[in-house]
Image (cartoon, rainbow, N blue to C red):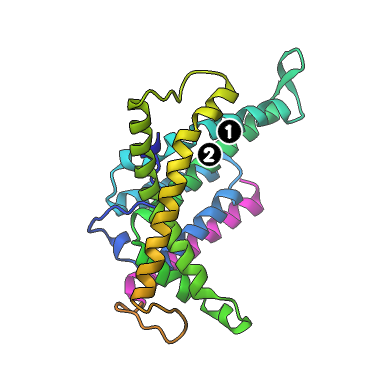
Amino acid sequence: MIRDITIGQYYPADSPLHKLDPRTKLMGTLVFIISVFLFNTIPGYAVATVFLAAVIKISKVPVKFIFKGLKAIFIILIITMVFNVFLTPGEVLWSFGFLKATREGISLAGKMAIRLIYLVIGSSLMTLTTTPNQLTDGLERGLRPLNKIHVPVHEIAMMMSIALRFIPILLEETDKIMKAQIARGADFENGNLVQKVKNMVPLLVPLFISAFRRANDLAMAMEARCYHGGDQRTQMKPLHYEKRDHVTYMILALYLAVAIGFRVAGI
């Protein structure tokens, strides 16, 4: 399951989505997330599905690779659905003791499941088609107006970029440590909840040590290269919008207008 997490990974490909400005992709992800919560009916989710399928097709990222990331949220998805089914008041369809499944709960569980799945896929598409450096530059340029109120935009963008960069590294490190501990007789599967928590200690301790060591090495490397952020820092590849970015913004505006229209009309 550790290898199934795709958020934070980059998939190199020669696609129109990879060539877009990172600010455009950030805005597109934000618009898609907003639309997922605006749509509230089957026709609305059908529109979101068509839009997401078109973006996946354009990205040239294998569908299996994208949907592999859903395995990591399977438990969260099941828990969310169960809570919504049994804790939402409404017309009771089935009951067993104090557990009561309602029609409204089933409907809400389905909507929440769709939203959660689409949020993960949409976020994964952004990181799969955008390198960490591009993401940092896009965040910094997009949030630049906040500099006027003394918000450390560059530092925030750099921290987010480093965090995304370290996700696949830490996942790979976790997999290696887990296999090494299993070879030494560690058991991460059997036992009750308390025992499973105790069994995680041989995994968490070396993982934290490795994470702190990597963070220290990164800090020393940045200091050795006299790294400093701020407005005076130049970029090797300055960002600039092209025709495809303007076309994408028009498509996003139209898609958002459709989502708002569906919400207002109750479709």
Q: Quadrant of the N terminus?
A: top left
Q: Is residue 202 within the magenta segment?
A: no
Q: Is residue 251 within the magenta segment?
A: yes
Label 2, residues with CA under 10 Å away: few <14, some 14-19, many ≥20 = some
Residue at the image position 30 percent from the left and 61 percent from the top: 18
The quadrant holding residue 113 is top right
| Residue matched to label 1 | 110
Whether residue 174 is situated above or below residue 84 in the rendered picture: below
Region rendered in magenta = 241-267
Majority secondary structure of magenta residues: helix
Residue 114: assigned label: 2
Residue at the image position 31 percent from the left and 49 percent from the top: 57
Whether residue 245 is situated above or below residue 81 in the rendered picture: below
Foreground residue among 4 and 48: 4
Please provide percent x and percent y for residue 144: 51, 78
- Answer left or right for 119 relative to 18: right
Residue lying farthest to the top in this orientation? 96
- For badge 1, the amino acid type reads Gly
Please provide percent x and percent y for residue 42: 55, 39
